Image (cartoon, rainbow, N blue to C red):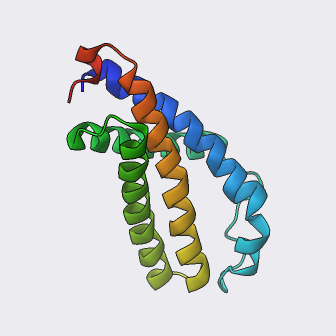
Amino acid sequence: MNMKGLLVGAVSGGVVMFVLGYLIWEVAFVDFFAAHSGSATGVGREIVLEWAVALGTLSLAILVTLCLGWSGATTIGAGFKVGAIVGLLAWLGVDLILYGATNLQDLTAVCADALLELVRTGIGGATIAAVVSKLSPAAADV
């Protein structure tokens, strides 16, 4: 995959993942995660730094795009599969490390967060595969 494919894939996937992240964690599951927080208090920001969340999501989208290129995944289904695996493994790892080192959330929230990330990065991976497959063969080349 050349630089154009990487950039187009990362931006398109990043936008989709950013929107899905907002809908999942700030709208649909906000009460669930509040109910499953750990004993740590005062750690959540009153106003979320959206620029930092956007850059973090872009970083994850770049990782998914690279993994799609390395795996040769070019279909929406394969993009979902690769994205889902990357998201699950990355966030399960981060969540378990944080669970072991902090009191931010309970184990139920850790598992739920990783599974929700599987969905978000799976859809992001499907989006990236769909968009990159529409580029010229040189841009989408693995």
Q: Is residue 17 above or below residue 35?
A: above
Quarter of the rendering occupied by the N terminus: top left
| 28 sits to left or right of 71 | right
| 111 sits to left or right of 97 | right
Q: Nearer the viewer, residue 67 or 43?
A: 67
Q: Nearer the viewer, residue 34 or 124?
A: 124
Q: How many marks?
A: 0
Asked if residue 106 can be seen in this view, the reply is no
Percent coordinates x, y for residue 22 in the rendering: 69, 49
Q: Is residue 100 above or below residue 139?
A: below
Percent coordinates x, y for residue 62 in the rendering: 38, 39
What's the residue at 43%, 55% (across, down)? 84
Q: Nearer the viewer, residue 55 or 70?
A: 70
Percent coordinates x, y for residue 131 in the rendering: 45, 26
What's the residue at 56%, 43% (across, down)? 17
Identity of the residue furthest to the top in this view: 136
| 92 sits to left or right of 43 | left
What's the residue at 46%, 40% (across, down)? 126
Q: Is residue 115 above or below residue 136?
A: below
Quarter of the rendering occupied by the C terminus: top left
Please tell me in which quadrant of the rendered image residue 32 appears.
Answer: bottom right
Please tell me in which quadrant of the rendered image residue 135 appears.
Answer: top left
